[in-house]
Amino acid sequence: MVIVPPATIGILGGGQLGRMTALAARSLGFGVQVLDPDPDCAARPVVDRVIAASFDDADAATELARTSQVVTLEIEHIGAAALEAAQQHAPVRPGPAVLHVVQDRARQKHWLASQGLPVGPYAVIDSAAALGEATRRLGPVLFVKACEGGYDGRGQVRMAPGDDPAVAFSAIGSRRAVAEQGLSLAMELSVLVARRASGETRVYPLSVNHHERQVLAWSFTPGDLSPEVTNEAERIALHIADALKLEGIMAVELFLLHDGRLLVNELAPRPHNSFHATELACPTSQFEQLVRAVCDLPLGAVAPVRPAAIVNLFGDLWLGAAPPRFERALSVDGTRLFLYGKGGARAGRKMGHIAAIGGTAQQALERAQRAASLL
Ligand code: ATP
Ligand code: MG
């Protein structure tokens, strides 16, 4: 059943992804409310209501769902009981089954492998001794990632040859974790698939991503990859969306190896930092597409009308003696500034991004980087 404006959409999470989803929903004429632990979250100024509660609070999730026609999310770390409670009152899209697969890194990896999808060598470990064993089997370089709760490189460590497994295990909080073989990457890519409740799907063109200190620094779309890589990415994305009967959008982070093989790094069943450039590159941004998908509305066009790039702005920029010089960045033609309205700047915290269009993706990236450097 289609959900049309002026219905209200409930979003679990009111960070920047919730904020930008809310803005897209607003443009379409929907009402929006969010649930977030922080009453002053990034989405607050652009939504009708913030329910301030933890992501495990079943009563608060019930309240969100009871007063919304559909519930979606911008963060995957939502308690199972809260999801189930919400589901009693409004469809939760993507649903608890999708979240169950994604929320735990080990379960996600096993699921991907069980689907015959390509993943790198890994082991699930729950002790320093098991990590030592994994180091001997998969090393010398390993990425150790806690099964639950990590993002932007948090809850994970890169182990270099000779590093002590006991130190690494305690650095991730002595928790159950996935130990992955450190791969030599030719490139990092991502693909985004949208699937509406009644089954229609669309796949966005590839984004090319660059990470620094395990966090996304910049991204552009469309990536100019070989037809083999492009088709394989699309095949993987559609397989995942159909196998999970996805209702919403799913970003698939991919590693391209030097031999041309594509591996799935991880899944994100929500808007993704590496598709912020769709706001400028595509007729339908990832945020509008999420709204359409969860409301079972016809999906929007995804073929890029021009290349675009984004550069993330981190809190470090705000910590200097003078505030960032936004007017200088905006003097670069073809750029747009997106600030998330976050109060407290901290080193490494995502505060906003600069997006740019260009004749080529490379030109778009150079513009966005030039604008960011002027801040
Ligand atoms: P984010 O929230 O930014 O996606 P995350 O905390 O979920 O980050 P991952 O996506 O697992 O973490 O890893 C972050 C980055 O670390 C990757 O994009 C990649 O640059 C690097 N990385 C992770 N695992 C590996 C690996 N097995 N081999 C090589 N590089 C890796
Ligand atoms: Mg990642």
Image (cartoon, rainbow, N blue to C red):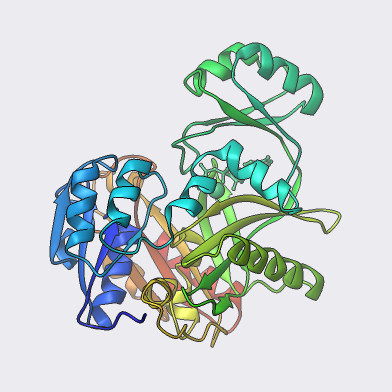
Q: Who is closer to the viewer here, 303 or 321?
A: 303
User: Where does residue 164 sit, x and y in percent of width and height?
Assistant: 65, 13
Vertical relation: 192 (above or below) 125: below
Residue positioned 71% across, 53% down in the render: 115
Q: Quadrant of the C terminus?
A: bottom left
Q: Who is closer to the viewer here, 165 or 177?
A: 177
Residue positioned 14% across, 48% down in the render: 39
Residue positioned 56% across, 67% down in the render: 192
The total of numbered circles placed on residues is: 0
Q: Residue furthest right?
A: 259
Q: Who is closer to the viewer here, 243 or 21?
A: 243
User: Where does residue 292 sit, x and y in percent of width and height?
Assistant: 39, 78
Residue positioned 17% across, 54% down in the render: 63
Q: Quadrant of the N terminus?
A: bottom left
User: Where does residue 111 sit, x and y in percent of width and height?
Assistant: 65, 46
Please indicate whether residue 70 sits to the left or right of residue 216 in the image. left
* Residue 15 seen from this side: no
Vertical relation: 312 (above or below) 305: above
Please indicate whether residue 325 sits to the left or right of residue 66 in the image. right
Q: Who is closer to the viewer here, 306 or 238?
A: 238
* Residue 349 seen from this side: yes
Vertical relation: 17 (above or below) 225: above
User: Where does residue 130 sit, x and y in percent of width and height?
Assistant: 68, 16
